[in-house]
Image (spheres, helix red, strand yellow):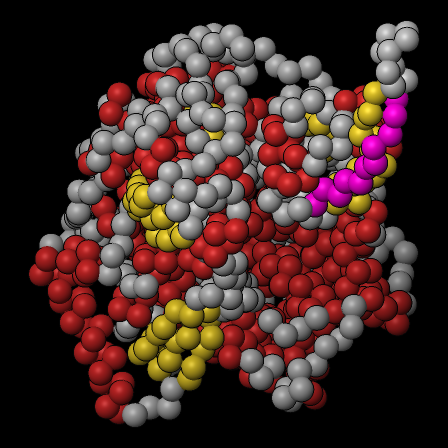
């Protein structure tokens, strides 16, 4: 692995800035290019306004909000059980992971804890939705860079994971499986054996993608040294998840905070990469997918027996109070700040979604890059539109 | 990366695609030719909601708990013949209308869960798309017909607590 | 020219050649689309591809053509309508002009230019004009970027292509494509001509450079920067719809077929089989049945080459514009110049 040292990173950034400045001074006639709201690279309706000089970007700004659905407001007029089905749809690729922090926050307010079996199954489902989410990223990355085959491989193998999620929860995309105090149901028979086989297939998929895409010299030349985000910049823009870890910050909420989940029972490595370029972000995600399959394998073997639901009143009223819970979602840190006034539903919910913060760095990182690099950088930052706009 | 005799990634990539091609030729594709062959969804799959009309008491719990209010219920009170001979006639809720608008439904399953009388069930059936959006409003006879497709609940994995 | 078993009048020959030219462009295009684009790509992605139209989906292309013909021919308001309409025709025409020099058999040629190689390489770059014009006249920023990228790329890769062919021309001692075929099939290795020698063996470097340049000329991945659907939304083709898009589409694959024909003539021995097997000395001795077998041999070689082109296309991500230019100017052109020098030295030495 070649590592870019700090000097190289700084010189790259300086060169980009100098190029951009030169073009502004020469006052060549620019062009404003709207990437989006409808554009294949934004996989959704994100709009990026880019001032171009030739093919070089001198100024760029993301415009979010084309798909705003107002979840924070919607939750105020729903009861607690109804909210889970709505917040499923924030990051629609890893939807189970969206439910968990909210449910944990509500449980914290009600001062109950899910039984250990439920915690294990929650963690397994959480990691499965991470795999479902990130494996699509690995395929989509290929499409953004012009290779068409990886995305079909990703869809092919992601299907197995979705089948697992559907087999246990009933919903492929929107499981709505989490309940305050536990889970809706236990696992069906034969699910654990199937899971182990699927995890094998997914590790194979990771190898295939590594051979097909990550090992490809063209791919490396497209991503290495493109869109470098130094650690301090990444932190100051509030980035999280794999994007932050790719900048060399060793920060993972699964390991760094104690929640009533089963991550501490599993042994896993938090991957970081010192480069902070697009390659690093993609590579960290690939390793994370591998790591997630290992977590699932370990947890599946050691699920304790017992009930999956704690004693919870039939009509859920959450006592007055405020709670903040965030977890390490597939896209980064996702948290819910829940304020309850003792009603059937929350009084106010603030949703901190990872993509919104991750995408806010684009004006900084897109300055001075070429048009094809916009696509590389956007693809490697990996956002889900629902997660930006909520 | 570990130092080993390195095959160029370009050639490895070609190998992956060619390998997949031969695998597809040999073992068949991973896709299903949909109208001719179908995949069977898992037992728990949330396909369509079936209604057992006899069990429904028009208590409105499902309609109230639905997050997007896609269940429409109307009922009236009527006298039913007594259970035992010589008893008093009972007063029961009779169901006049039970519609689910599948154009609105989010398939969350809260109504099935909340039903205290076991009148609603999930069926994994999924082929009920309609050319007209208004036809997605299933009335109680149509919802009753789905009852035939409702499977038995699956057995649970080892270690699950008995209910 | 050998006498045919039955004499075809001159007008009949002309008619045959015109029809043959159309077949030689459209038949490979259709076959390539079905075999490689529909089926090979699908199989590489573990799916079956179109299966409904005709047995095993073989009529799918006709269905697609029917679909495109029905669509409205949209012309953007600010577009330069005349040029906009002509552009796809230029692209397709260059393909027809290109196939003209390709020999398919001892007599099965369309025209037998003395400077066939020169003509082919000159006409091969006409399609750039069509693409540039299409990008410019669409009044769309993405199209413009795509058109400019295409122009830059095609000009850059024209050069290594020409230089790669020079090696072949030196070795064959002729610029006539028919003579190049003969030279390969009568090639003597230390006085023995039992197998002939396709130039791919002696000019392997040239062959590689030629194929890379062809890949770039055809704007197939990894050189599909001008089309780049994920960033430029199909580049110069963005605004086209209906049958004008169809013409671009046919043009893309027909050109792939024709360039593969030319590559198989230059490097794989063309329509010929080693002449010594049947005791032929020159092209005039060749039996008439080669006029029937020749196109078949050419077709097989074309499919092989297009198969490789498509295989690469389905596997690789694309280059960035500047990397692509750097690759042409800093890698391919020096190597091909070196190749010419070595070929020339060896030619003189032996």
Overall secondary structure of the magenta section: strand
Q: In the picture, residue A16 is in which quadrant? A: bottom left
| Point 45% across, 43% down: residue | A343
Quadrant in which residue C76 is drawn: bottom right
Which sits in the foreground, A106 or A272?
A: A106
Classify residue C272 as left or right of residue A129: right
- Quarter of the image holding residue A324? top left
The question of residue B71 being in magenta is answered with: yes
Residue A328, x across and y down, in percent? 31, 40
Looking at the figure, which quarter contains the N terminus of chain A?
Answer: top left
Q: Give the range drawn in magenta.
A: B70-80
Q: Does the magenta stretch include residue C168?
A: no
In the rendered image of this protein, does residue C232 appear above or below residue A290?
below
Q: In this view, does A370 lie above or below A22?
A: above
Q: Can I make out residue C49 in this image? A: no
Q: Nearer the viewer, residue C15 or A24?
A: A24
The location of residue C176, given as percent across then percent down, is: 58, 67
Task: Give above or below for A366 relative to A327.
Answer: below
The foreground one among C200 and C343 is C200
Residue for point 28% across, 73% down: A368
Residue drawn at x 77%, y 49% as measured from the top left: C60
- Residue A120 seen from this side: yes
């Amino acid at each position: 692995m070649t590592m870019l040292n700090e000097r190289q990173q700084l010189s790259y950034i300086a060169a980009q800035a100098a190029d951009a400045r030169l073009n502004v001074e020469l006052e060549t006639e620019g062009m404003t290019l709207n990437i989006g709201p409808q554009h294949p690279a934004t996989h959704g309706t994100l709009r990026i306004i880019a001032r171009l000089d030739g093919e070089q970007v001198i100024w760029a700004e993301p415009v979010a909000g084309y798909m705003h659905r107002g979840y924070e407001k919607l939750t105020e007029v729903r009861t607690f059980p109804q909210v889970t089905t709505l917040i499923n749809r924030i990051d629609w690729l890893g939807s189970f992971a969206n439910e968990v922090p909210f449910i944990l926050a509500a449980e914290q307010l009600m001062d109950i804890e899910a039984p250990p079996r439920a915690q294990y199954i929650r963690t397994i489902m959480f990691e499965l939705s991470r795999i479902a989410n990130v494996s699509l990223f690995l395929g989509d990355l290929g499409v953004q860079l012009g290779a068409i085959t990886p995305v079909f491989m990703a869809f092919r193998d992601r299907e197995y994971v979705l089948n697992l999620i559907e087999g246990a929860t009933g919903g492929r995309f929107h499981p709505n499986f989490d309940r305050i105090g536990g889970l809706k149901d236990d696992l069906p028979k034969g699910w654990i054996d199937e899971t182990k086989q699927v995890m094998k297939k997914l590790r194979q998929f990771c190898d295939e993608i590594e051979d097909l895409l990550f090992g490809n010299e063209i791919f490396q030349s497209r991503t290495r040294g493109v869109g470098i985000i130094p650690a301090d910049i990444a932190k100051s823009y509030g980035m999280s998840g794999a994007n932050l870890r790719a900048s060399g910050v060793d920060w993972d909420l699964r390991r760094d905070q104690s929640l009533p989940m089963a991550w501490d029972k599993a042994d896993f490595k938090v991957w970081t990469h010192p480069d902070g370029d697009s390659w690093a972000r993609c590579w960290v995600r690939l390793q994370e997918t591998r790591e997630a399959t290992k977590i699932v394998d370990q947890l599946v073997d050691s699920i304790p027996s017992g009930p999956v639901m704690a004693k919870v009143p039939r009509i859920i009223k959450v006592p007055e109070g405020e709670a903040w819970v965030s977890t390490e979602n597939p896209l980064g840190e996702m948290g819910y700040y829940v304020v309850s006034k003792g009603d059937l539903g929350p009084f106010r919910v603030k949703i901190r979604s990872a993509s919104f913060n991750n995408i806010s760095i684009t004006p900084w990182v897109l300055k001075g890059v070429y048009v094809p690099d916009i696509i590389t950088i956007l693809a490697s930052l990996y956002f889900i539109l629902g997660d930006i706009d909520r | 990366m570990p130092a080993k005799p390195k095959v160029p990634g370009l050639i490895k990539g070609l190998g992956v695609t060619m390998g997949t091609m031969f695998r597809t030729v040999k073992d068949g594709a991973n896709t299903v030719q949909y109208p001719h062959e179908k995949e069977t969804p898992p037992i728990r799959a949330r396909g369509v909601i079936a209604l057992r009309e006899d069990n429904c008491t028009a208590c409105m719990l499902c309609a109230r708990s639905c997050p997007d209010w896609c269940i429409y219920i109307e009922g009236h009170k009527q006298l039913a013949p007594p259970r035992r001979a010589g008893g008093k006639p009972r007063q029961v809720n009779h169901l006049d209308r039970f519609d689910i608008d599948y154009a609105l439904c989010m398939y969350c399953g809260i109504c099935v869960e909340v039903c205290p009388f076991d009148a609603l069930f999930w069926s994994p059936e999924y082929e009920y798309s309609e050319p007209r959006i208004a036809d997605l409003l299933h009335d109680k006879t149509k919802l009753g017909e789905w009852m035939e497709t409702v499977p038995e609940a699956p057995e649970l994995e080892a270690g699950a607590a008995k209910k | 020219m050998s006498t045919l078993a039955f004499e075809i009048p001159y007008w009949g020959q002309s008619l045959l050649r015109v029809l043959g030219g159309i077949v030689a462009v459209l038949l490979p295009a259709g076959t390539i689309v079905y075999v490689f684009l529909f089926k090979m790509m699908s199989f590489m992605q573990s799916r079956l591809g179109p299966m409904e139209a005709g047995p095993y989906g073989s009529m799918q292309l006709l269905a697609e053509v029917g679909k495109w013909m029905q669509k409205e021919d949209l012309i953007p308001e600010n577009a330069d309508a005349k040029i906009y309409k002509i552009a796809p025709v230029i692209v397709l025409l260059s393909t027809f002009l290109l196939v003209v020099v390709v020999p398919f058999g001892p007599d099965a040629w369309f025209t037998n230019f003395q400077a066939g190689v020169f003509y082919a390489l000159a006409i091969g770059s006409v399609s750039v004009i069509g693409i540039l014009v299409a990008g410019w006249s669409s009044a769309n920023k993405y199209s413009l970027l795509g058109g400019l990228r295409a122009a830059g790329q095609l000009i850059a890769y024209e050069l290594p292509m020409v230089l790669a062919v020079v090696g072949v021309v030196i070795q064959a001692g002729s610029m006539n494509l028919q003579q190049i075929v003969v030279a390969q099939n009568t090639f003597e290795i230390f006085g023995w001509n039992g197998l002939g020698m396709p130039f791919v063996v002696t000019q392997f470097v040239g062959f590689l450079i030629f194929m890379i340049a062809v890949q770039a000329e055809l704007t197939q991945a990894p050189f599909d920067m001008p089309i780049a659907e994920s960033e430029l939304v199909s580049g110069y083709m963005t605004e086209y719809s209906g049958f004008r898009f169809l013409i671009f589409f046919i043009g893309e694959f027909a050109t792939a077929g024709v360039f593969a024909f030319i590559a198989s003539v230059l490097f794989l021995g063309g329509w010929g089989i080693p002449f010594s097997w049947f005791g032929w000395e020159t092209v005039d001795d060749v039996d008439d049945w080669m006029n029937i077998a020749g196109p078949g041999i050419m077709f097989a070689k074309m499919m092989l080459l297009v198969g490789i082109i498509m295989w690469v296309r389905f596997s690789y991500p694309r280059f960035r514009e500047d990397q692509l230019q750097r690759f042409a100017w800093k890698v391919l052109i020096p190597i091909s110049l070196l190749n010419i020098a070595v070929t020339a030295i060896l030619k003189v030495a032996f």
